[in-house]
Each structure stands twice: as structure tokens, then as C-alpha cells.
Amino acid sequence: MTNVMIKVGDESAESYIGALKHVDPSLNILEWPNYGNPDEIDVAMVWKLPHGELRKFPNLKLVISMAAGVDHVLSDPHYPKDIPLVRVTDPHMARSMAHWFIMNILQLHRETAYYNSLRLKKIWASDKAFDTDSICVGIMGLGYLGVHLATMLSNIGLRVQGWSRTSKKLEGIRSFTGDDGLAEMLKATNYLACLLPDTPATKGILDRSLFEKMPKGSFLLNAGRGNQLVEKDLTMALDNGQIKGAALDVFIEEPLPQNHPFWNDHRIIITPHHAAEVFMPSAAKAFVENIERVRSGQPLKGLVNQKVGY
Ligand code: NDP
Ligand code: OXD
């Protein structure tokens, strides 16, 4: 029997346990902190487990991040580095993430907030045409989610380019690497879509100097992680017109504090870190498959490279 310890942030794990047992009824799944004897835990499935907890399980064989991002695990200074870590790579999540970007790019392009304000005043203003050909989306992070996003944006007729750590060959999508490559991409990007993981190399990457490399009046969309954005630099760039509007799903502090200036800034679309959630009916199969793979010594799917941090 495989014993699994589960902790899903502040949520009850009940529905997750139900979905996992639906796929493999033989799993013994125990919700943190009532996991019984720590020596008997084989697998930990986690989202925002308190730091230091994982080292309590001496016979752990696998850690499953119940999220695509693994910063919540790797930021634990006590993370047992010899234990393999896998993460979510799920087509449902990729589709949902692409929908978040498409929805917000089009809302910003079509000035939805402005037209909603006119609607409240019963004003019919039909004098403006929207030039979709003017949009060029630059995606920072051409990984599992970023490539899916690039393809979906291209399929709805938008120009797309992307930037990643290692070079990519994607049909119809210009891709860049390195600092010079990023600067080159930014020159021709007026909608910047960030889908980077949170690592030391990406912390604070969305800052004033980056905004200044884009054409004046560009837009910023971030669903990667809050740490990537220097929040005061965004406010400054909005004030001086370098950035015209933004859509943010992730923040340095979540939930976004009540007194945070972004709440009152109508140039920023705010969503509560739910651009793309784990969809258990499909993710549960992948989680169970990895548990079976670790049991039978087969290569794991979605294995994290702990050296690069994602
Ligand atoms: P992947 O690991 O598949 O992709 C990460 C991409 O970022 C890769 O293309 C990688 O390059 C690139 N990258 C990493 N570091 C650098 C760097 N220093 N310079 C340039 N490029 C870099 O991750 P996913 O696509 O699955 O997910 C991306 C992130 O999205 C997650 O880590 C998470 O933070 C966020 N996320 C947010 C959600 C939300 O609801 N807001 C939901 C799900 C995910 P390379 O290809 O060369 O390795
Ligand atoms: C994720 C997230 O990384 O939901 O999956 O943020």
C-alpha cells in the first residue's frame, strides 16, 4: 500500500482525496497534519505546506507539487533535495491559462473598462475602430504553459514572439534567449505576457528598465509570480505613460492587502491568483501515474530540475 500525505493550502483536501481515490482506490491518503506515523509516508502531495514539514518524513520517495509552480516547495530551506519533485503539467490548466491572457489582452485592447463606464452613463460611442494587427504579444517563458499560450494567440490571429532560457524552434513564432534577445523582443512587443517561474534569476525582472525597452503605451500582463514584478515601478510606468494598462493575477503579497494601492488603480485589472487552477478530474490521473512510476522505478513525468529551480 502507498501512504500519501496531502496538504492543499488552506483548503480542505476532501475533494482532492475523492478524485485521487477515484483513480486509485488502493491509495491511503492522509490529510496534514493528521498523517499518523511519519515513517510510513511514501508520497507528499503539497500546495503551500509549511516549511520544514517535509523533512519529518524519513522514507519519502516522491514530492508532488499540486501546482505548476514549485517555488512554494523549493523556497523551503529544509527541502530534502535528494527526493524527486514533480509538478502539474496539464492540458486543462494550459487552456485555462491561455484563456486568462486572451481575455485580458482583448479587454485592454478593446478598452472594456472605458466602455463599461460609458455604459453606466448610457452613452453610445461607436466612433472608434480597433486595429488588432497592431497587437504584438511577447511571452516571457516559453515552457509548458507559454508554448500553449503562444499557439492559441497565434490561432486567434495575433502576432506572437517569445523568450526563454534555452532556445526554441516554434513554427510562426519568433523566439529569443539571453539579455540581448529579451531587449530585441521587447522593442517589438506592446503586450508583454509573463509566464516565468519564480527563481532567483526572475525575481524583480519586470522593472522600470524592462518597461523602458518597450514602446511607450505598452501593456503588461503577469500570471507568473508576484515576485517578478517591482510593483512601485509599474505604478511609476503607468503614471508616466510608458505602460498604459496592466492585468495582474499574482502579487508579492497574497491575498492582496486591503491597503495596497493597486486596488484603487483602475488602470490595473486584478484577478485573485486564479488564472489557471488545478483541474482534478484530469490532474488526478497524472498524479497517480507518477505515484505508480516511482513505485515501479520508471522515469517520472513533470520532473523538476531543482538546480535551475523550476
Ligand atoms: P515551465 O517550467 O514549463 O516553463 C518555464 C519557462 O520559463 C521556460 O520556457 C523556461 O525556459 C523559462 N525560464 C525560466 N527561467 C528563465 C530565465 N531565467 N530566463 C528566461 N527564461 C526562463 O513552467 P510552466 O509553463 O508550466 O509554468 C510557468 C509558471 O506559471 C509557473 O512556474 C507558475 O509560477 C506560473 N503559474 C501561475 C498560475 C496562476 O494561476 N497564476 C497557474 C500555473 C502556473 P526554458 O524553456 O529554456 O527552460
Ligand atoms: C500554479 C498556480 O503554479 O496555481 O499552479 O499558481
Image: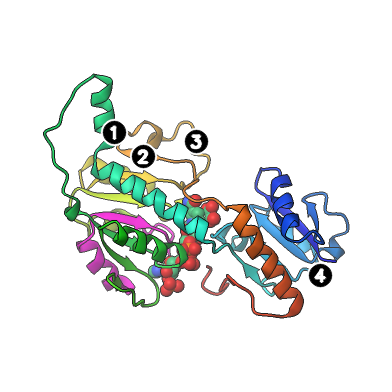
Residue 227, visible in the rendered structure: no
In this picture, which residue range is highlighted in magenta? Answer: 176-205
**Residue that mark 3 sits on:** 257
- Amino acid marked by disc 3: Pro
Gap in Å between the C-alphas at discs 3 and 4?
39 Å
Q: Are marks 1 and 4 in contact (CB under 8 Å)?
A: no
Q: Label 1 sits on what residue type?
A: Ala
242, above or below 188, in the image: above
Q: Between marks 1 and 3, how big is the CA–CA gap?
A: 23 Å
Residue 187: within the magenta? yes
Look at the numbered disc 4 and give the secondary structure of its residue.
Answer: loop
- The response on whether ligand 2 sits within 8 Å of label 4 is no
Residue 208 at what x, y percent from top left?
A: 29, 53
The tag earlier along the polypeptide, 1 or 3, is 1
Report which quarter residue 298 is drawn in: bottom right
* Residue, disc 2: 269
Determine which residue is flagged by label 4: 59
Kindly report the distance in space between the C-alpha atoms of the residues bearing marks 4 and 2: 45 Å
Contact? badges 2 and 1 (CB < 8 Å)? yes
Please state the horizontal and vertical placement of residue 163, each as a whole percent of the image.
Answer: 34, 68
